[in-house]
Image (cartoon, helix red, strand yellow):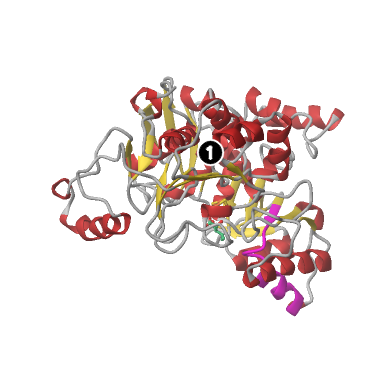
């Protein structure tokens, strides 16, 4: 019987495998950021162990960085300390750091792919749940905890049980105004925020195949939001085209050799999955979440479920969630006023996202009482946006183009949404307090967020495109 893509990659990275024990899996690339690395480096220091493969380890500062005046000292004491610790640790252990001011600095899941560090067939880890993003290249990429960060720093291997395999097929074509963010929000709304727990997902089908690399990254990024260990997409011409010529991508004869290997990375026709789910792209409309987990999503024209439609055991948490959001069961969201628009995060802060928003808002102005933050995912995205004049379009629309970082995706830096305010956000989590204490988050696509920026309310973007 044939193998799934996941198994092909996993099997070629297993160093030791014993029945009843986790496999020891070799890791090709280990990304590091300021939040989950300090204790890991402390552990090495205490045990007098060096970083085993410094060249396979890359660090960036993203979570705690401010997104304005990055040349000035960081104001928040805790954030400043985190970023300083990363600088000290990477220096001491000889790890390359793309810190503030570096032309490669940015959100860890944006810079890996754009620099050509993330490649098909790799195993990639980071002390960060959205490491699943890198799976878009046909890599096994997943988030790990701080003690595992220490394990990988020390050995370049990780102990892991092999997850189950799920295939999610999205067939057919997307309708106008519907983009990859809507696909993944739709899938999660159908299977719930825990629907893929214990699985590693492979996304397939015409609607996935026809996506650009950046759009595929948006899908894989949110795999974790349905409980999956990670998600991946078999590499194809779109993938190879994207990688070619990037800073750290293989060149010359190395490229030819790599390409020949990458072309073997697909799921065999007779391979078996533990679970297969199928969706039709034509059923998907622009999505928006109404609750406090990413599974609480609806099509923008639909209504929040009524209490009667739920099982008794679901009612208390549903009620609590809607109370937090200041919303009523059964209500529609169209026309609901928004206060903030956040376009950024490792889900949607790449150049295509910014281009999509710029194309849409060109010549339009934001609604008066809405604050619009556009936060590029990296210095390179920021530079490209300026080169293309996208910054001017945003300025004319009244949008605030900031500097790269995680920003308002989570309240770990200065960019917080004030209590009680509604923010339509292109990020991946709408948890209570995620964007700031008592801030209320609607997750949506960059297009839907841009539409809300112009009208000042939740809007069906299809009426404006
Ligand atoms: C801070 C980090 C550990 C965390 C994660 O693991 O995902 C963050 O990136 C997030 O998105 O919540
Ligand atoms: S942008 Fe958000 S989701 Fe992505 S790594 Fe940063 S905090 Fe986590």
Give the residue at x 45% y 59%. Answer: 418
Residue 56: where, in percent of width, then height?
77, 52
Say left or right for 262 vs 398.
right
Residue 101: where, in percent of width, then height?
78, 53
Closer to the camera in the image, 446 or 431? 446
Closer to the camera in the image, 132 or 176? 176
Res 255 quadrant in image? top right
Above or below, comparing residue 344 to residue 99 in the picture? above
- Disc 1 residue: CB within 8 Å of ligand 2: no
Residue 31 falls inside the magenta stretch: yes
Above or below, comparing residue 385 to residue 327 in the picture? above
Magenta region? 30-46
Q: Indicate the quadrant containing the C terminus: top left, top right, bottom left or bottom right.
A: top left
Helix, strand or loop at label 1? It is helix
How many labels, in total? 1
Say left or right for 182 vs 96.
left
Give the residue at x 32% y 47%. Answer: 290
Residue 12 in view, yes or no: no
Residue 408 falls inside the magenta stretch: no
Res 122 quadrant in image? top right
Find disc 1 in the rendering and name its residue. Answer: 218
Q: Residue extending furthest left?
A: 308
Give the residue at x 63% y 68%. Answer: 76
Mark 1 Cα-neighbour bin, 10 Å: few <14, some 14–19, many ≥20: many
Res 333 quadrant in image? top left
Say left or right for 64 vs 366.
right
Closer to the camera in the image, 437 or 95? 437
Give the residue at x 43% y 64%. Answer: 437
Closer to the camera in the image, 247 or 50? 247
Q: Residue extending furthest right?
A: 252
Residue 108 in view, yes or no: yes
Residue 340: where, in percent of width, then height?
46, 48
């Amino acid at each position: 019987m044939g193998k799934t893509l996941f198994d092909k990659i996993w099997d070629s990275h297993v160093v030791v495998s014993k029945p009843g024990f986790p496999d020891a899996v070799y890791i090709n690339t280990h990304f590091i950021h300021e939040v989950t690395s300090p204790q890991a480096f402390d552990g090495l220091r205490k045990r007098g162990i060096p970083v085993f493969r410094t060249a396979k380890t890359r660090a960036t500062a993203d979570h705690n960085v401010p997104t304005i005046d990055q040349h000035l000292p960081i104001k928040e004491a805790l954030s400043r300390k985190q970023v300083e610790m990363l600088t000290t640790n990477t220096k001491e252990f000889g790890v390359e750091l793309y810190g503030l001011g570096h032309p490669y600095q940015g959100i860890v899941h944006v810079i890996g792919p754009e620099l050509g560090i993330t490649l098909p067939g790799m195993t990639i880890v980071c002390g960060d749940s959205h490491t699943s993003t890198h799976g878009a290249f046909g890599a096994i990429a997943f988030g790990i905890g701080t003690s595992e960060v220490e394990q990988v720093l020390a050995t370049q291997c990780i102990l892991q049980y092999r997850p189950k395999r799920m295939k999610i097929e999205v067939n057919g074509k997307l309708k106008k105004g519907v983009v990859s963010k809507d696909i993944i929000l739709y899938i999660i709304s159908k299977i719930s925020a825990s629907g893929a727990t214990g699985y590693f997902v492979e996304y397939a089908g015409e609607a996935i195949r026809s996506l650009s690399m950046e759009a595929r990254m948006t899908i894989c990024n949110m795999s974790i939001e349905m409980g999956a260990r990670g998600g991946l997409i078999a590499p194809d011409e779109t993938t190879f085209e994207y990688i070619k010529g990037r800073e750290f991508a293989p060149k010359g004869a190395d490229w030819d050799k790599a390409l020949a290997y990458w072309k073997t990375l697909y799921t065999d026709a007779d391979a078996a999955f533990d679970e297969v789910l199928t969706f039709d792209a034509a059923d998907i409309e622009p999505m928006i979440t109404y609750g406090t987990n990413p599974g609480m999503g609806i099509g923008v024209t639909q209504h929040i479920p009524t209490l009667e439609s739920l099982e008794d055991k679901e009612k208390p948490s549903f009620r609590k969630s809607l109370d937090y959001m200041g919303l009523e069961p059964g209500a529609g969201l169209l026309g609901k006023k928004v206060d903030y628009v956040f376009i950024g995060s490792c889900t949607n802060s790449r150049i295509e996202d910014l281009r999509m928003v710029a194309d849409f808002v060109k010549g339009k102005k934001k609604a008066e009482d809405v604050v619009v933050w556009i936060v590029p995912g990296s210095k390179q995205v920021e530079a490209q946006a300026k080169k293309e004049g996208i910054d001017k379009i945003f300025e004319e629309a009244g949008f605030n183009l900031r500097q790269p970082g995680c920003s308002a995706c989570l309240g770990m830096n200065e960019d917080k949404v004030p209590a009680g305010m509604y923010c339509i956000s292109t990020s991946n989590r709408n948890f209570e307090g995620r964007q700031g204490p008592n801030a209320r988050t609607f997750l949506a696509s960059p297009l839907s967020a841009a539409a809300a920026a112009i009208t000042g309310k939740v809007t069906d973007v299809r009426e404006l495109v």
